[in-house]
């Protein structure tokens, strides 16, 4: 094992959209695990839109990073030194670690990775936090019923791609918004979406949605916000449910954007709009992981990862989230276990 590890740190806070100057790659000594901890060689790390909020100083549902802090996120890796009876050297685990070659993880806060169920990167997507977000967000907040229409924005992303598939498993008519013809084809041809709208080539979102969802919208799973959400709200049905999971269209805004006022549009349908934080369901993560794993093993749930090779490319992979570079889950491969 190497004596040093490369590690990404927050170099400065972004103003608007982040750039590469916000990141600094440092070399430091490999840390020693304390009692109850594991030293993990990281094979894959996750980059996610919510991390943009952690780069800012303002209050958010995720604690902000201080300038100079190591960047953190979901990781999958091999235990190379264990100071816990729960795991042994050579075990594959997933948890939250640094953007680094090696990171120390709390043994009580990791989970085992079973490559016989799915390739390890899937444990950062469909079988990880995004999958659990989709599971609880749709089933607990959206409460879909057979025959209802579910609309998903950011439908080809890590969360949205799972939302639509679970909605189909529940007998719903599913419509997704995504940002390329390749993505919309993936949604309809591989994931079973009934219709998909390329928002980058569609001039009138309202008209396109009315055509794709002629019976109106019963559940809206919002990962994006912005003009797509503005188009969905007037088409909500009586007792519609809106799960607000993300607002990536606004994350880099330097001032609060304005648009059509939405509250009057939920009066007549008596719609319910609820924010969604997956950690509110932490005590039930095991339930979600078991069901998601069963669906994947049975071939009922498809997963896809966009893998960027090399720890040094992690900032580029993160920035690519805001231009829609990824299909499915965006993952960085840090180490190649086959080497």
Image: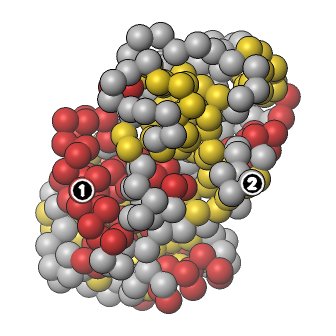
The relative height of residue 294 versus residue 107 in the rendered view (above or below) is below
Q: Is residue 298 left or right of residue 330?
A: left
* Residue 237 can be seen in this image: no
Q: Where is residue 318 in the image (x, y as percent from the top left)?
A: 69, 44
Which residue lies at the image location 47% right of the left edge and 10% below the top edge?
Answer: 34
At 46% from the left and 59% from the top, the residue drawn is: 115
The N terminus lies in which quarter of the figure?
Answer: top right
Comparing 114 with 214, the one in front is 114
Question: For this view, does 291 lie left or right of residue 230?
Answer: left
325 in relation to 165, above or below: above
260 and 23: which one is in front?
Answer: 23
**In screen coordinates, is 184 left or right of 281?**
right
Closer mark to the observer between disc 1 and disc 2: 2
Query: Helix, strand or loop at disc 2?
Result: loop
Between discs 1 and 2, the one toward the N terminus: 1
Q: Which residue is drawn at 23% across and 70% down?
A: 218
Give residue 195's position: percent from left, percent from top.
44, 85
List x then y, in percent, for residue 286: 23, 46
Residue 103 position by quadrant: top right
Q: Is residue 9 left or right of residue 209?
A: right
- Marks 1 and 2 sit apart, C-alpha to C-alpha, by 31 Å
Circle 1 Cα neighbour tier, 10 Å, few/some/many (<14 / 14–19 / ≥20): few
Which residue was labeled with disc 1?
290
In the rendered image, the vertical position of residue 261 relative to residue 178, given as above or below: above
| Residue at x 35%, y 70% (from the top left corner) | 296
The answer to which image quadrant residue 258 occupies is top right
Q: Are marks 1 and 2 in contact (CB under 8 Å)?
A: no
Residue 255: quarter of image? top right
Task: Please say if 171 is above or below 226.
Answer: below
Residue at the spot of label 2: 339
Please say which color scheme the image uses. Answer: secondary structure
Q: Is mark 1 on a helix, strand or loop?
A: helix
């Amino acid at each position: 094992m190497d004596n040093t590890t490369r590690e990404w740190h927050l170099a400065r806070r972004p103003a608007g959209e982040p750039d590469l100057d916000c990141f600094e790659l440092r070399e430091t000594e490999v840390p020693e695990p304390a009692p109850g901890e594991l030293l993990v060689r990281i094979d894959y790390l996750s980059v996610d839109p919510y991390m943009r909020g952690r780069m800012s100083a303002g209050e958010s549902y995720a604690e902000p990073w201080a300038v100079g802090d190591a960047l953190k996120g979901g990781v999958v890796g091999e235990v190379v030194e264990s100071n816990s009876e729960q795991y042994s050297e050579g075990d594959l685990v997933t948890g939250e670690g640094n953007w680094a070659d090696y990171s120390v993880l709390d043994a009580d806060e990791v989970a085992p990775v079973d490559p016989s169920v799915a390739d390890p990167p899937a444990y950062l997507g469909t079988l990880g936090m995004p999958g659990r977000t989709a599971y609880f967000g749709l089933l607990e907040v959206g409460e879909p019923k057979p025959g209802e229409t579910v609309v998903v924005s950011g439908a080809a992303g890590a969360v949205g791609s799972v939302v639509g598939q679970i909605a189909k498993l529940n007998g719903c008519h599913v419509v997704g918004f995504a940002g390329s013809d390749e993505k919309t084809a993936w949604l309809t041809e591989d994931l079973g979406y009934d219709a998909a709208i390329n928002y980058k080539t569609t001039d009138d979102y309202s008209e396109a949605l009315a055509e794709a969802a002629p019976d109106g919208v019963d559940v809206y799973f919002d990962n994006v916000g912005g003009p797509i959400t503005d188009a969905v709200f007037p088409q909500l049905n009586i007792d519609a449910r809106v799960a607000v999971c993300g607002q990536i269209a606004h994350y880099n805004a330097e001032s609060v954007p304005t648009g059509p006022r939405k509250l009057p549009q939920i009066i007549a349908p008596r719609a319910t709009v609820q924010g969604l934080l997956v950690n509110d369901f932490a005590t039930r993560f095991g339930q979600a992981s078991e069901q998601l794993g069963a669906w994947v093993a049975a071939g009922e749930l498809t997963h896809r990862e966009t893998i960027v090779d090399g720890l040094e490319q992690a900032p580029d992979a993160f920035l690519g989230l805001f231009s829609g570079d990824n299909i499915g889950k965006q993952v960085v491969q840090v180490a190649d276990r086959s080497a």
